[in-house]
Image (spheres, coloured by chain):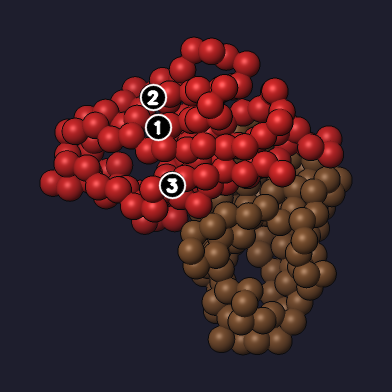
Chain colours: A red, B brown
Amino acid sequence: AQTVTQSQPEMSVQEAETVTLSCTYDTSENNYYLFWYKQPPSRQMILVIRQEAYKQQNATENRFSVNFQKAAKSFSLKISDSQLGDTAMYFCAFMRLTSGTYKYIFGTGTRLKVLA
Amino acid sequence: DTAVSQTPKYLVTQMGNDKSIKCEQNLGHDTMYWYKQDSKKFLKIMFSYNNKELIINETVPNRFSPKSPDKAHLNLHINSLELGDSAVYFCASSYSNTEAFFGQGTRLTVV
């Protein structure tokens, strides 16, 4: 069975600094997708970044980048120049094809607090 | 303009009642989902529909019944509500192999 593990329940970072959130997953599949979602206090789930497993290049979206290590089954999120608005729960998610559709499995989340 | 919209945003109801949560997406996606987020923020898939057809039905009590009248709508009906059903329910949609877009969630409180 696929699992997604986020080992850091809570983290904090000073504004303008860099923070890395960790995520590991377990799968025997070769083709899959990985995502980071952000859930601010508003409750809305917002896609932060996406990585296809077949791509070796790490995805980057502005201040957000990932370190994807396929062999190690690791998918960490780096937030550079942290801003107060980055305060949120962050969920790592794994998606694979199953029963003819794509199924997400989410990690338990990391609560990130950006300090002024 | 909202891509995935759920109604209502908040729902407070008594045990034993029957309630529905509606979801609509205007993105033209072919797949829609219902997720449950519990008090510890754990997100778990409940159902997935592809082109109005039920594809994933996780271990969910049969008091929960999804209904997809068309590709743009996936409603969730819950019978005989129990205290343990209190949670935030998220609707989401996607094209088959792309990221899901989520609604704003419905906070259900059963008293």
Q: Residue furthest front?
A: A72
Which comes sooner in the sequence, label 3 or label 2? 3
Badge 2 vs badge 1, beta-carbon distance below 8 Å:
yes
Q: Secondary structure at mark 1?
A: strand
Residue holding disc 3: A7
Is residue A49 toward the left or the right of residue B81 in the image?
A: left
Alpha-carbon span between mark 3 and mark 1: 13 Å
In the rendered structure, the residue with mark 1 lies on which chain? A
- Given residues A71 and A30, the one toward you in this image is A71
- Given residues B26 and A55, the one toward you in this image is A55
Amino acid type at image mark 2: Ser
On the image, which quarter does residue A64 sit in?
Answer: top left
Which comes sooner in the sequence, label 3 or label 1? 3
Q: Secondary structure at mark 3?
A: loop
Is disc 2 in the same subunit as disc 1? Answer: yes
Alpha-carbon span between mark 2 and mark 1: 6 Å
Residue A95 seen in this snapshot: yes
In the rendered structure, the residue with mark 3 lies on which chain? A
Numbered tag placed on residue A65 in the rendering:
2
Residue beneath the point at 46% across and 20% down: A59
Residue holding disc 1: A77
Amino acid type at image mark 1: Leu
Work out whether B22 lies above or below A75. below
Work out whether B32 lies above or below B34. above
Q: Around disc 2, counting alpha carbons within 10 Å, would you say few (fewer than 14), some (14 to 19), or many (20 or more)?
A: some
Q: Secondary structure at mark 2?
A: strand
Residue B73 seen in this snapshot: no
Which comes sooner in the sequence, label 2 or label 1? 2
